[in-house]
Amino acid sequence: MNNSFKTRDRGGRDRFQKRSDRNYGGRKRFGGHIGGGAKRGRFHAKTISHDKFINKNPTAQIEAVYTPAHAFSDFGFHPTIVSNLAKKGYKNPTRIQDESIPHILAGRDVVGLANTGSGKTASFVLPIIEKLKKKQTLETALIVVPTRELAQQIQFEFRQFSDGMRLYSAVCVGGLNIYPQKKDLRRGPNVVIGTPGRLKDLINQRELRLENTTTLVLDEADRMLDMGFLPDVTFIISKLPVKRQSLCFGATITPEISRLLQKMLIDPVTVSVRTSETGEHIAQDIIRARTGEEKMQKLTDMLAQDDFEKVLIFGQMKHSVQKLADLLSKMGFPAVAIHGNKSQPQRQRALDMFKTGKVNILVATDVAARGLDIPNVSHVINFDPPNTHEEYVHRIGRTGRAGKPGQAYTFVG
Ligand code: AMP
């Protein structure tokens, strides 16, 4: 990483165990908050065995060598979709696309078990565009997602794949002014993409009408329920026509999801492509640090290494994540933060800066980072440990995507 704290030490992980006499202004004041967070209260690191944070022999990523059974041309998509696929540079379907698209096109309800990074967005977006175009009716689709960023990401893909097809979409998410969203809905979009709370508000205000919504997608369903959205999701589903196609994507099926699926799906096909979910292809290690000060020291030692090109740091609390980003920036490691206390435009700006490489360090809470597709993250650092193993796997899955190598480090006390 290009900054004034570059170190010459290239001697492997031991370098992080060293103490240094360098004095970073502000570190002392800060150390107590972030370092202490990992040791106290319900976020105690010891709930997960440290062994789970170590993988010194990463395997090759299986997804990278997948040979699809179909070509995109086999799906019989509208010629504009075909040309938009080519424009976007998609040559062959990914495994989730290969295995789920035929069922979705056939009108079946589908449960897709796939992580972000597997290409699952196109798995449902392409058949929805095909269906809407073919029927040329008033029918609409509703895509429910856990985070605002994911909604925007899906709309971006929808627009690219439906370019020139006169299909319109609206994003309805919390944290943004509701009035432009109402205006968008009054134009009668073909697809509405939104987060549960805002969608519920808009339904209650009779701005979002679902009588003609014949396709429902729940994306990142497991995250959505983790975040406590079950009542809102159940409410939304109750407002949909009974005769509809329902699709549900997520990384795991918890008992809670299973109960929801039993109520919302009819004779579903399950497609599971969770090959990289274990993070086996990601090199993982722990970093021991007892005090907040020691953590900061080791973190900055790492960030100073050349190979830490694009680093995603996870912290537990909204305020500590912001403080860490501010402190790193002050210390010569420009960083941005995303967390729930930021307004939606601020979150989007931070994410764009990280995605486009204007800033190479993003500090995030789990909630803010859910479902994001950020290319080329070289390292994930768990500055505060995750609460569950599943959360851990999700975090480290932000690196090592699309067949690239990835590395993850977790601070332990
Ligand atoms: P997703 O899991 O939908 O977030 O997709 C992960 C990344 O893979 C995104 O950057 C997509 O644009 C990309 N992607 C999805 N499907 C394909 C494909 N068939 N060929 C090439 N790239 C793809």
Image (spheres, grey):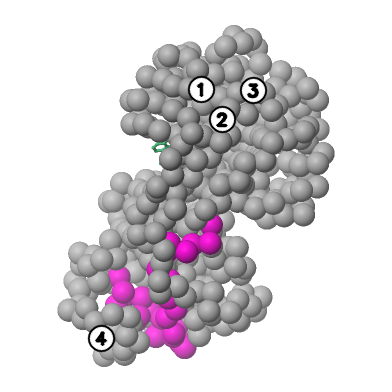
Which badge, 1 or 4, is on the more N-terminal residue?
4
Viewer-proximal residue among 125 and 301: 125
Which badge, 3 or 1, is on the more N-terminal residue?
1
Residue 341 visible = no
Tag 2: residue type? Ile
Q: Circle 3 is placed at which residue position?
A: 106
Residues at marks 3 and 2, CA–CA distance in whole angstroms? 8 Å
Tag 4: residue type? Arg
Asked whether the beta carbons under mark 3 and mark 1 sit within 8 Å of each other, the answer is: no
Residue 134 at x, y = what percent? Answer: 57, 11
For residue 375, above or below residue 215? below
Is the residue at mark 2 in contact range of ligand 1, meaning its CB lies under 8 Å from it?
Answer: no
Q: What residue is at 82 percent from the left and 39 percent from the top?
A: 263
Q: Circle 1 is placed at which residue position?
A: 75
Residues at marks 1 and 4, CA–CA distance in whole angstroms? 60 Å
Q: Residues within 10 Å of mark 3 (few under 14, many from 20)?
A: few
Q: Circle 2 is placed at which residue position?
A: 101
Residues drawn in magenta: 277-303
Q: What residue is at 47 percent from the left and 70 percent from the top?
A: 382
Residues at marks 3 and 4, CA–CA distance in whole angstroms? 63 Å
From the viewer's perspective, tell me whether residue 118 is left or right of residue 186: left
Is the residue at mark 3 in contact range of ligand 1, meaning its CB lies under 8 Å from it?
Answer: no
Tag nearer the camera, 1 or 4: 1
User: Which corner quadrant of the figure contains ligand 1?
Assistant: top left
Res 58 quadrant in image: bottom left
Asked whether the beta carbons under mark 1 and mark 4 sit within 8 Å of each other, the answer is: no
Viewer-proximal residue among 9 and 353: 9
Viewer-proximal residue among 348 and 218: 218
Which mark is on residue 22? 4
Tag 3: residue type? Ala
Viewer-proximal residue among 305 and 327: 305
Which secondary structure, mark 1?
A: helix
